[in-house]
Image: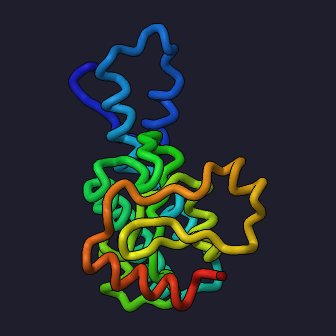
Amino acid sequence: MFGSYTEIGSSAAVRIMASVPLSLRTQSWSCIQQEIDASFSDSDADIADIRRIKGVSETTKQALIDARIGQGKFRTELLNHWDSLCAVTGCDQLQILRASHIKPWSESSNSERLNAKNGLLLVANLDALFDRGLISFCSNGKMLISKLISRSAQKLLGLPAALRRPPTPEENVFLEYHRRRVFVE
């Protein structure tokens, strides 16, 4: 009984860890929790959902699974590239950080989809604005704001705010695309 173990999925591990009372958690606990959150997110559940889809060929299911796994690698690379901090705010709350494609996934080649230089690590509200073209960034990292965002909304959202560091030349190629094809002036 005590000499064996049962492997559990990452989503179950996260739920179990979350059930431990705060008073029993040590300083190292948050480091372990962040590692689990960054490594496993919801990919296990997503892959299980893909496998259950009816009326779709196994080849299509495998392509969807491969894409989902690739997204996890993309996020991991962005976490490393941006030191696990939002590229704008510096927020380190992994649960709300999004791996945002600069050149949209649907318009990117396979290599661009997994290229970390085609991504920004953004808190959820900035990701939503960036994804919809309501904000973008200049080659020096300064934020551009669409005229569709009211002054009051800008104030509530703390806009404008620049990238924490200037974009690399490769990131600038993708940002130029975003400014031309996605950003709504």
Q: Tell me the quarter of the picture where residue 129 sits.
A: bottom right
From the viewer's perspective, is residue 6 above or below residue 171? above
Instruction: Residue at 50% x, 44% y: name it.
Output: 95
Please tell me which residue is depicted at 64% across the width and 78% down the height of the picture: 54
- The answer to whether residue 52 is visible is no
Most foreground residue, 43 or 106 = 106
Q: Work out whether 135 lies above or below 11.
A: below
**Residue 24 location in percent, x, y?**
43, 10
User: Which quadrant would residue 113 be assigned to in this image?
Assistant: bottom left
Q: Tell me residue 179's x, y (percent).
A: 51, 83
How was this image coloured? rainbow
Q: Which residue is at a point 75% across and 55% down the rendered structure image?
A: 153
Between residue 74 and residue 158, name the one nearer to us. 158
Please indicate, yes or no, whether residue 50 appears anywhere in the rendered image.
yes
Extreme residue toward the left, this view: 3
Q: Is residue 116 left or right of residue 126?
A: left
Q: Quadrant of residue 141?
A: bottom left
